[in-house]
Amino acid sequence: MISSFHAQEGFGLPPPMLAQEIANGRSVLANASPAQLRAELYHAKGSLNRLLILLWHKDERVRTAAALALSGGDGHRAYIPRNGHFAGALLRRLTGQNIAPTPQERLEQVAQALHDLLEQSANDLRGMANMHYSFLSCALYLALLGTCRDTLASVRRLRVATAHKGLCRLLYELKQPSVMRRLNAQDAAALANEAALALAAMPPQELPGFWHGLMQGEKRRRLAYAEALSAFSDRRAVPYLLQTLEGAHLDIVIPLVRCLARLGDPQALPALERLAQGRNRALRQEAAAAMGQILRGLEKRPSRLLLRPAAPPDFERQLLRPLKERRETLLEPEELLRSHPQEEQ
């Protein structure tokens, strides 16, 4: 079954053509919009679909190059980081599975493998609490960071929404005191930023675990999730932000307000106005600043501020004369309607 499928999907292409297939898929991941990404993924001859097929190629070098293309690496320049084990860890989870016959099922297999890698990275970060520094542990430290960063980049570029729970867990683990004692602060900030970018690249409606975590009772989890709001730029997230704002704890209200101010959607103005009239002074100032930022953004977009009547217009009053069948109902005398000499003739 697998060999016949390989023959149908072009696994016998010469190496130059395989390299071009990998380059095309990498280019789509780097430059395509979400709509173009879906089109390339679910089309039988799409570049991204053919890149995923190469993850099951019989040649190990082709499989490795295709895996590195998911995270941004290529064969024409130095691959950074060189100490990560992302490609090998991903391929070990895929080679034990038969290649799926449809693009959707292939994406699900890759998504599950990426989710497992995120869970493994979170477990490794937690396990570092009992590690003593040495030459060997430093090498493991670098390998862990490189693999985790490549996994986050692949999730972001593929927009794997099913892996968002793994991203949320990674954000939470990066705030654990036991983990932070062994992890460099700059490395932790870089991983948290990559996780935030991966969450922001996904459709907001496909992140129920993230929105639910912002309202949970554990303060450390709420704060860890709230830091990811700084990466959101999709206005489709505004309804979810407003819903979260209604029942949010005080410690994450300011990050929510700042995110709404950055998105600049006017539908957030009523909620911000209520906050600007509250008792908390810091929150009043943040809400007022957010309202000012949104209003200034609207002033810079005159096309959104076209003058329209507040109520539906009365078209019958605006007509020059009512459209009646009988001539005697016209408001103007008949001789005034004959304004052109040719019409009289």
Image (cartoon, rainbow, N blue to C red):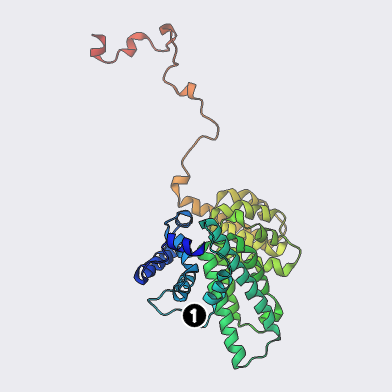
The reply to whether residue 46 is visible in this rendering is yes
Left or right of 332 on screen, residue 38: right
Mark 1: which secondary structure? loop
Tell me residue 59's x, y (percent): 45, 74
Residue 339, image quadrant: top left
Q: Please rate how many residues cluster around mark 1, counting C-alpha atoms within 10 Å: few if below 14, some from 14 to 19, many from 20.
A: some
Relative to the observer, which residue lies in front, 66 or 122? 66
Q: Amino acid at mark 1?
A: Pro
Residue 122, image quadrant: bottom right
Is residue 7 positioned above or below 124 on the image? above
Relative to the observer, which residue lies in front, 134 or 312? 134
The reply to whether residue 293 is visible in this rendering is no
Is residue 86 positioned above or below 137 on the image? above
Relative to the observer, which residue lies in front, 48 or 13? 13
Q: What residue does disc 1 label? A: 81
Tell me residue 128's x, y (percent): 67, 83
Relative to the observer, which residue lies in front, 236 or 208? 208
Q: Farthest right residue?
A: 217
Q: Which residue occupies 43% across, 59% down?
A: 8
Tell me residue 203's x, y (percent): 56, 56
Tell me residue 254's x, y (percent): 65, 62
Image quarter hosting the C terminus: top left
Is residue 204 positioned above or below 150 on the image? above
